[in-house]
Amino acid sequence: MNKILITGGAGFIGSNLTEYFLNKGYNVVCLDNFATGHRHNVEPFLENPNYQLIEGDICDLEICQKAVENVDYILHQAALGSVPRSIKDPITSNDVNVSGFLNMLIAARDAKVKRFVYAASSSTYGDSASLPKVEDVIGRPLSPYAITKYVNELYADVFGKTYGLECIGLRYFNVFGRRQDPNGAYAAVIPLFIKQLINHESPKINGTGDFSRDFTYIDNVIQMNELAMLTENPDAVNTVYNTAVGDRTTLNDLIEYLKKYLSDFDGEIANIDAVHGPNRVGDIPHSLASVEKAEKLLGYKPSHNIDKGLKEAINWYWTNLK
């Protein structure tokens, strides 16, 4: 089978991609520096003869060059996520997300990989007020993180046109699911809220709770990565795609969903109320993706809506957090 390099392979999305492609018989190389990824995410793979772990940083070009040896495809997930993290420390976010990304592009170009699929971001839409979000209409970035992810798209476009490197960017919309870390200062909202409710704590919503997001379950993201990696449609490469469901949920509604499904395990959770704080700097009010382009060019069909995804995620968290 072909060999895939998954950068950030010890992280939430990277480890799920690793598990999926190992189960399909691929050889998988993981590159991770464990800055935000976790060793427990890769422990199940270490005895698999088709798996190789390289501990290293994408900011080191030599490490990137080592990791791409004899690789057919790259699924580039490594990045420093989080809008608040980038606002607090824009230099480190830029070093990893821009310079590290460029290192991976150079290594991919020189190794003549078949395709470079990378994690882009819905934050690229910035202050664009149009809904749903379509790939060709973006606004001005609202955070250093958003700038770095937009620069990724610009670099990928240039490498496609200048060097013939096939690149596909996937603009992730609020991905959630198994293995997403609920701990730390920059935990995503769904695992954080689940942890708080399980511990009988009131979730804190930034703002009134009317902001909405296109919450996207991990299995939809896996599907998009596979379609992007393997498509033989020449019109489908060297572009970007929304990776989402095409539906949106307010934070207030999200809390109600979580309380409903978690109360099946613990009835007291139904009585926990959320608390509200100030809006978070750099947040966009509403996020809703059009997935028409991915459906047309890649054959994408989301397998999980918010309801189905939350049920599966909560089952996983209840088992692993209790």
Image: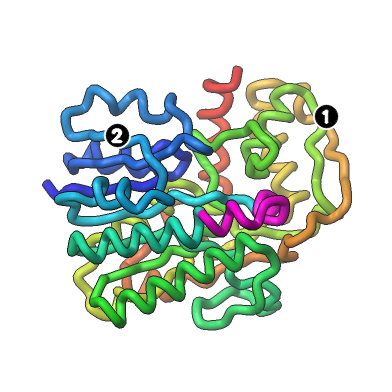
Q: Which residues are magenta?
A: 83-95
Is residue 279 among what the camera can see? yes
118 magenta-colored: no
Q: Is residue 218 left or right of residue 282?
A: left
Any part of residue 312 in sight: no
Q: Is residue 92 magenta?
A: yes
Residue 76: x %, y % from top left: 37, 54
Q: Amino acid at mark 2?
A: Leu
Give the farthest residue toward the top: 322
CB within 8 Å, label 1 to label 2: no
Identity of the residue drawn at 35% across and 58% down = 104
Q: CA distance from mark 1 to mark 2?
A: 45 Å
Identify which residue is drawn at 41% across, 36% down.
10
In the image, is 289 to the left or to the right of 143?
Answer: left
Q: Earlier in the sequence, mark 1 or mark 2?
A: 2
Q: Amino acid at mark 1?
A: Asn
Question: At 78% across and 23% down in the image, what residue appears?
Answer: 200
Packing grade of label 2 (10 A; few <14, some 14-19, many >=20) is some
Residue 166 x/y as whole percent: 27, 71
Residue 51 locus on image (x, y percent): 23, 34
Q: Which residue is mark 2?
A: 53
When asked about the image quadrant of residue 90, the answer is bottom right
Q: Main secondary structure of the magenta part?
A: helix
Q: Is residue 8 above or below residue 262?
A: below
Tell me if 23 is positioned left or right of 269 in this view: left
Residue topped by disc 1: 271
Return the mark for residue 193: none
> Local crowd at mark 1 within 10 Å, few (<14), some, or many (≥20)?
few
Question: Could you say whether the residue bearing mark 2 is in a helix, strand or loop?
Answer: strand
- For the residue pair 7 and 55, the one nearer the viewer reads as 55
Q: 148 and 290: which one is in front?
A: 148
